[in-house]
Amino acid sequence: MATLNVLIVDDEPGIRSGIVRILNHFTVDFPFLDKEFDFNLIEVETGERAVELLDAGEVDIVLLDNKLPGMDGIKVLEYLTKKEYDCSVMMITSYASLDLAVKATNNGAYNFIPKPFTPTELKTSMEWITKNLYLRRMTKKMNTEGKQIRFQFLSVLSHELKSPINAIEGYLNIMKDGQLGENISDYKVMIDRSLERIRGMRSLIMDMLDLTRLESGKKSRDVQKVDLVELMRISKDTMSPMAIQKNVKINIDAQPEHILYTADRQEVEIIFNNLVSNAVKYNKDFGEVNCELRDEGACIRISVSDTGIGLSEEEISKLFQEFVRIKNDKTKAISGSGLGLSILKKIVDEVYHGTVSVESVPDKGSTFTVMLPKV
């Protein structure tokens, strides 16, 4: 367990003692954290005293009242921001207003909670500020160490997950309050949009896990003879629900009927799932996806073609870059992480020493071809 120093800055003894009671035995734990966090609580009643302790260092989180005798909370926040101290601030005040909230966040406050607050509200806020502090410090450390790809992970993760989570929360609150009526069918559009955002978040998380596993090199590989045709059929089944929604037909043409290849099953599934899911996502309604597998002696050729929106030459040149998504009027409604094809290329190039190529005609479709050499 790790301990974070929490500085409570409030001129009301009752507020300070209340916060201490709530947080005294409280711990924060998230699945991605290496350890739990508990809190060492430090109480001061003036802004001037807070600045002294901040200058002395060893403060991780500041719970800061705005209305203080002498130096007020906003001034303390401005001082802390100017000094670029590595800590997070949450404003706590009974004088809550939109102007004050905006001013506080513009000056670097992470969050804003008005008095009176419940123990649950304070604990929830502490969970989020602790997680934010942990991620920010980990990002800084990784970036300093030159782990730029992991810095991008955290940036993309926070950006891509925040918006759908906020949207889903908003929809749920509308449904909870019954703002559109008591009939569940009145909320069908909101439910559909929430499910779509959940699918997008799941795709992003799975892509990031795949890329993290590849980058770390820590996954133990299970290399054996696998039937590529069988794995392509599994990918077809996996993507069928999405294909059905768009009335897209997925075809498989394999010669011979069974093609054995020495590989890690999960790695091949990543390759096939990315190829087929992209061919469905970027296809037109009532289109087709044609998956062709050929044993050509020295290598295996896998081609996946679609009848979709296609790509320009400029778009193809960017296609396999990490965190890059092709954005235009035709793709703006299609969710994705911008990681799938870069992961595919890493596996094909670096693990199997093969090649990936793309041929595409705008508004007519694309063909992705993977060549896997036999060892």
Image: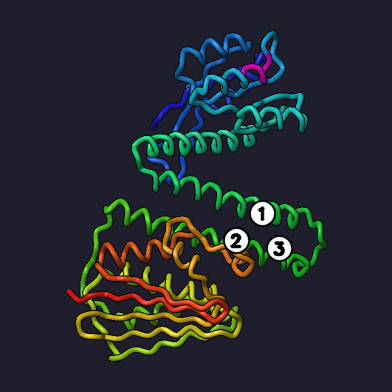
Residue linked to disc 1: 167
Mark closest to the chain's N terminus, 2 or 3: 3
Disc 2 secondary structure class: helix
For the stretch drawn in magenta, the main secondary structure is: helix
Residue linked to disc 3: 190
Examine the image and state in which quarter residue 138 appears: top left
Residue linked to disc 2: 197
Q: Position of residue 173 (x, y in %)?
A: 72, 52
Q: Classify residue 158 as left or right of residue 258.
A: right
Query: Is residue 72 in view from this perspective?
Result: yes
Q: Is residue 357 in the magenta section?
A: no
Task: Tell me the CA gap for discs 2 and 3.
Answer: 11 Å
Q: Position of residue 125 (x, y in %)?
A: 60, 35
The answer to whether mark 2 and mark 1 are in CB contact below 8 A is yes
Mark closest to the chain's N terminus, 2 or 1: 1
Q: Residue furthest left?
A: 375
Residue range corresponding to the magenta coloring: 72-76
Task: Tell me the CA gap for discs 3 and 1.
Answer: 9 Å
Q: Classify residue 52 as left or right of residue 184.
A: left
Q: Residue at x 39, y 44 (%)?
A: 148
Q: Local crowd at mark 2 within 10 Å, few (<14), some, or many (≥20)?
A: some
Q: Local crowd at mark 1 within 10 Å, few (<14), some, or many (≥20)?
A: some
Q: Height in image: 211 above or below 183?
A: above
Coloring scheme used: rainbow
Q: Amino acid at mark 2?
A: Arg
Q: Position of residue 185 (x, y in %)?
A: 76, 70
Q: Height in image: 5 above or below 287?
A: above
Q: Amino acid at mark 1?
A: Ala
Q: Amino acid at mark 3?
A: Met
Examine the image and state in which quarter residue 9 appears: top right
Nearer to the camera, 301 or 259: 301
Q: Height in image: 184 above or below 68?
A: below
